[in-house]
Amino acid sequence: MNGLRFFVILGALAASACSVSPVITDPGDSAGDRYGSCRRAARDVCKYREADDEARKQCVAEATYVCVKGSGE
């Protein structure tokens, strides 16, 4: 009976030691993220293409989307 109790306690300790914690990160925090890189590149391209502020915002949004989407991956 003592052997069974030992294994039950050992199992309970092992089960309590393991836990799953979700990792949630903000996409804008990492320096190497695709969205941030695409956004910076789109801003650089669109600031020379568009003089109007609204047209520039639209250009950045569209260019960022196309970049993040990729070429049919």
Image (tube, rainbow, N blue to C red):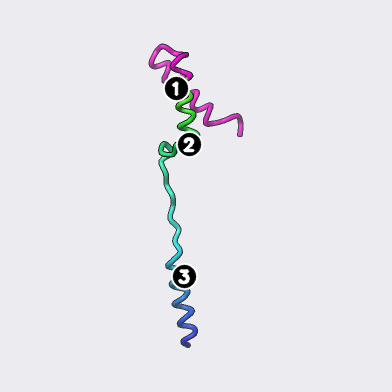
Q: Position of residue 63 (x, y in %)?
A: 50, 23
Q: Which residue is mark 3?
A: 14
Q: Mark 2 or mark 3: name the one nearer the start of the chain.
A: 3
Q: Is residue 9 magenta?
A: no
Placement of 40 over or under 1, stated as above or below: above
- Give the residue at the far front of this rendering: 31
Question: Are circles 2 and 1 on residues that touch, CB within 8 Å?
Answer: no
Quadrant of residue 12 in the image? bottom left
Instruction: Give the spatial CA distance, label 2 vs label 3.
Output: 37 Å
In what element is the residue under mark 3?
Answer: helix
Q: Foreground: 47 or 15?
A: 47
Which residue occupies the foreground of this view, 25 or 57?
Answer: 25
- Which label number is shown at residue 33? 2
Image position of 66 with respect to 19: above or below: above
Mark 2: amino acid: Asp
Which residue sits at x=44%, y=13%? 50
Task: Say which amino acid is labelled 3.
Answer: Ala
Q: Residues within 10 Å of mark 3 (few under 14, many from 20)?
A: few
Is 48 drawn above or below residue 12 in the view shown? above
Amino acid carrying label 1: it is Arg
CA gap, disc 1 and disc 3: 52 Å
Instruction: State which quadrant residue 19 falls in.
Output: bottom left
Query: What residue did someone put label 1 on?
Result: 43
Range of residues picked out in magenta: 45-73
